[in-house]
Each structure stands twice: as structure tokens, then as C-alpha cells.
């Protein structure tokens, strides 16, 4: 999709959606429009729910702030740009002889 060929990705995401469909409702699950980044992120959220991959997906695609604000009523008001980086653990910073500083905002 990001290579400029979204139509080529549509059969693959539809195969995943058909596999997860209630028997007899496979056609209702298929995407018929052009594949978008939003559809891919939505599908990965459903497929990988609770598997700790979501943050990485959203940071990598530069959609963390917008999607958290749009879809997370608890996190939306609190999300800030600095949340795209994780805090460096204190034990890591204390265990070095160099001049590490904490990521901005933490």
C-alpha cells in the first residue's frame, strides 16, 4: 500500500477478514474500496488486540496522536507529542558513565 499499489494489497487483507468472519457472512467482511493506511491500522488493531504492537504501529506511521485522540476517549485528552518516545529507564541511565539525558517530557 505504501509502495503506491494499494489495489494489490486488498486481496490479502480480505483473506484475513474472510477467515475471521462468521460462517455465511464472509462477503460482508470484505473491503471493496481502495485500501488505505487507516484500514490497515484498524485491521491490525482487531487482529493483534492486546499484543503490545499497537504503539509501534502508530509511531511508525506517524498516526499516534491523531488516532489516540480520535479513538481513545480516556487517552485522547492526555496524549502529547512526546509520547512518541518512551522514557529511558532510570537503571539504564544510572548504569552508564556517559551523559545520557531523559527523553523530552519525562
Image (cartoon, helix red, strand yellow):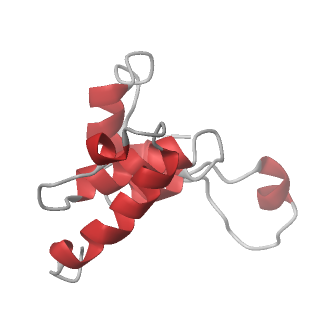
Which residue is depicted at the point 48% across and 40% down?
23
> Above or below — where is 61 with respect to 31?
below
Which residue is depicted at the point 85% across and 53% down?
91
- Image location of residue 28, percent across then percent down: 28, 40
Q: Quadrant of the N terminus?
A: bottom left
Which residue is depicted at the point 64% across and 39% down?
50
- In the image, 52 versus 94, the foreground residue is 52
Q: Residue furthest left?
A: 33
Q: Quadrant of the C terminus?
A: top right
Q: In the displayed structure, does residue 86 sit left or right of residue 79?
A: right
- In the image, 86 versus 106, the foreground residue is 86
- Image location of residue 10, percent across then percent down: 26, 67
- Image location of residue 14, percent across then percent down: 34, 59
Instruction: Evaluate whether residue 5 shows in this view.
Output: yes
Q: Quadrant of residue 34?
A: bottom left
- In the image, 24 versus 38, the foreground residue is 24
> Above or below — where is 99 with respect to 63?
below
- In the image, 86 versus 56, the foreground residue is 56
- Image location of residue 31, percent across then percent down: 23, 52
Q: Quadrant of residue 82?
A: top left
Q: In the displayed structure, does residue 73 sit left or right of residue 104?
A: left
> Above or below — where is 17 with respect to 71?
below
> Above or below — where is 94 with respect to 104?
below
Q: Residue furthest front?
A: 24
Amino acid at each position: 500500500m505504501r509502495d503506491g499499489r494499494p489495489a494489490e494489497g486488498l486481496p490479502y487483507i480480505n483473506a484475513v477478514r474472510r477467515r475471521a468472519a462468521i460462517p455465511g457472512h464472509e462477503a460482508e467482511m470484505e473491503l471493496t474500496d481502495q485500501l488505505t493506511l487507516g484500514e490497515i491500522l484498524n485491521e491490525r488493531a482487531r487482529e493483534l488486540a492486546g499484543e503490545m504492537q499497537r504503539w509501534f504501529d502508530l509511531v511508525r506511521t506517524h498516526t499516534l496522536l491523531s488516532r489516540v485522540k480520535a479513538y481513545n476517549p480516556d487517552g485522547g485528552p492526555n496524549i502529547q507529542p512526546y509520547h512518541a518516545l518512551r522514557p529511558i529507564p532510570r537503571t539504564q541511565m544510572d548504569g552508564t558513565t556517559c551523559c545520557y539525558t531523559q527523553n523530552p517530557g519525562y
